[in-house]
Image: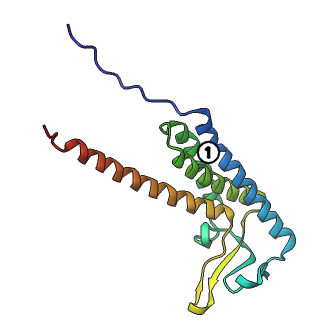
């Protein structure tokens, strides 16, 4: 009698896993939009405010407008960045349900990236530019980071999380392969 072929059953992601990305995206999108509207309504364009005196030489709020990518790169790319945001959002929405069960870290990262892409897209469609306001600098060494916003932060942090998670999974797989390739002591 022949053995039936062994079929591995891959568990499906739970509803909670699917909702994680959506919840992260919604929460961070709201935080991004609320902070941008607060800056637009309370700090005149081009002005800087130091909300916490103790950290004011290092972190201030500077109301700027950005027609480029994150950190003011590639200025005046309006339509291009609208298309990129729509395509990236579509890829994330398509790809996320295909992640394996238990991969909550990738869902978290994709939720952050989705909120960032949509947050800056909303600004571009609403006003033709993105409102930036977080200004980090270290005057003692002449370091002056480009002004950014919550959406930019979400995109960058999401990418970093995906890279770190990918490297961690790769190392774990290598360790597992090494264990499996070791001869069994008898």
**Number of callouts in the render?**
1
Can you give x and y, in whole percent of width and height, for residue 139 in the image?
62, 90
State the residue lying farthest toward the right. Answer: 41
Relative to 168, is 50 on the left or the right? right
Res 137 → quadrant: bottom right
Can you give x and y, in whole percent of width and height, for residue 66 in the image?
69, 70
Q: Name the foreground residue: 64 vs 52.
A: 52
Instruction: Please tell me which residue is depicted at 30% across the width and 45% down the height of the picture.
Output: 176
Can you give x and y, in whole percent of width and height, for residue 177 in the image?
26, 45
- Label 1 sits on a secondary structure element that is helix
Task: Residue under label 1, please give it.
Answer: 21
In the image, residue 68 above or below residue 123: below
Instruction: Please tell me which residue is depicted at 58% across the width and 54% down the height of the picture.
Output: 84
State the residue lying farthest toward the front. Answer: 186
On the rendered image, what quadrant is the C terminus found in? top left
Can you give x and y, in whole percent of width and height, for residue 123 in the image?
74, 60
State the residue lying farthest toward the left. Answer: 186
Q: Name the foreground residue: 64 vs 28.
A: 28
Res 31 → quadrant: bottom right
Relative to 95, is 50 on the left or the right? right
Res 122 → quadrant: bottom right
Instruction: Please tell me which residue is depicted at 81% across the width and 70% down the height of the picture.
Output: 39
On the rendered image, what quadrant is the N terminus found in? top left
Instruction: Please tell me which residue is depicted at 62% across the width and 43% down the height of the picture.
Output: 20
Mark 1: give few (<14), some (14-19) or many (20+) Cα within 10 Å.
Answer: many
């Amino acid at each position: 009698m022949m053995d039936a072929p062994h079929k591995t059953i891959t568990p499906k992601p739970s509803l909670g896993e699917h909702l994680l990305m959506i919840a992260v995206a919604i929460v961070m999108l709201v935080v991004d939009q609320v902070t941008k509207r607060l800056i637009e309504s309370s700090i005149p364009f081009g002005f800087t405010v130091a909300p916490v005196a103790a950290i004011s030489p290092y972190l201030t709020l500077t109301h700027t407008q950005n027609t480029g990518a994150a950190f003011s790169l590639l200025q005046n790319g309006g339509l291009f960045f609208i298309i990129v945001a729509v395509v990236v959002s579509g890829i994330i929405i398509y790809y996320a349900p295909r992640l394996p069960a238990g991969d909550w870290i990738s869902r978290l990262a994709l939720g952050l990236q989705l909120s960032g892409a949509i947050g800056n897209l909303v600004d571009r469609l609403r006003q033709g530019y993105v409102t930036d306001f977080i200004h980090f600098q270290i005057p003692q060494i002449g370091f002056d980071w480009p002004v950014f916003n919550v959406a930019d932060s979400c995109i960058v942090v999401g990418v970093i999380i995906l890279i770190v998670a990918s490297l961690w999974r790769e190392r774990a797989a290598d360790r597992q392969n090494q264990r499996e390739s070791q001869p069994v002591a008898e």
